[in-house]
Image (cartoon, rainbow, N blue to C red):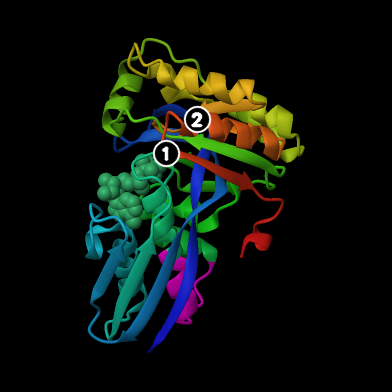
Amino acid sequence: MTGRTKERAWAKLNLCLDVTGILPGGYHALRSVMQSVSLCDDLTVSVSPGEGNIRVGTNRAYLPTGEKNLAGKAAAVFRDAAGLADVDFAIEIRKHIPVCAGMGGGSSDAAAVLRALNRLCGTGMDTKTLCKLGESIGSDVPYCVLGGTALAEGRGEILTALPNMPECFVVICKPKFPVSTPEMFARIDSAAELPHPDTDRLVDAVKAGDLYGAAASMGNVFETVLPKGQREIASIKGVLRSSGAIGSVMSGSGPTVFGLFPEREGAEAACFVLRQRYRETYFARIPKSWDEME
Ligand code: ATP
């Protein structure tokens, strides 16, 4: 078997993220409306006759290669599920999604590899099967296989596809302070009281195609447990709002913050201001349809 294909790995944002309890096994139960945005990594995936070896190269020297990279892990999971022991896999990733930013970059690369290999190897696995394979790689991978707008529950593997969010522009800003996801979960566990976001209201707004209602319903429980003195999130939100954002929220366990804009001009203005202070500021959009992005 020989072949090569290209695949895009879209970044994800959490329009809403809540922790609703603890699952059997000790995992946190999540409830999140996830959204793909036009910022993406570009992957080239190749197969050739061989012995099941996996090679991963990226334009970020600090990222792991081979099966330690989530994209390589996805190739291994796919190889074993499809019984392809006589094929070598080569994956080249051009990263654009910021790393450790709460934007699911690694998970999205893994999902892109599953989609690309399924196509390239003619294995004909359906989306449900690919999502199931994704579960063993990481809790955001099943969503990333689907993409678009979706409600994720459980550990992230119980997915309900939602109508696409109305078209809008997104400004994404990653401040420099590091965030440890395990530490953020520990803060959630020890919080006396948590102000939970209204996920149902957001889902209803998305279903109604109501961009303003959706933007106003965004929320993230992790934002409420950020270390005290962490004022940068509020200051970035202030810039987003004063440039015309109709809603802004932190994504994942942080530290990335984003704002939604109905107009391109406001988003470009916010980008211009934020880039002077934060190198990792990105302009993206949520398209009317993901088909137009292929
Ligand atoms: P999430 O939003 O799903 O929590 P994240 O945006 O916080 O993810 P990633 O950028 O996906 O985090 O990377 C997290 C870790 O995974 C990093 O330590 C990185 O070294 C490792 N990693 C493995 N493969 C990849 C990849 N293809 N791209 C980015 N990071 C990867």
- Residue 69 can be seen, yes or no: yes
Question: Callout 2: few (<14), some (14-19), or many (20+) C-alpha neighbours within 10 Å?
Answer: many
Residue 213 picture location, percent across and down: 72, 28
Disc 1 vs disc 2: Cβ atoms closer than 8 Å? no
- Reading the image, the residue beneath label 2 is 274
Question: Is 195 part of what is drawn in magenta?
Answer: no
* Residue type (three-letter) at the residue carrying disc 2: Leu
Question: Is 117 part of what is drawn in magenta?
Answer: yes
Pointer 1 or 2: first along the chain: 2
Query: From the viewer's perspective, is 171 left or right of 70?
Result: right
Residue at the location (27% across, 27% down)?
Answer: 183
Give the numbered dot on residue 280: 1
Up/down of 277 relative to 53, above or below? above
Residue stretch in magenta: 113-126
* Residue type (three-letter) at the residue carrying disc 1: Glu
Residue at the location (50% across, 45% down)?
Answer: 12
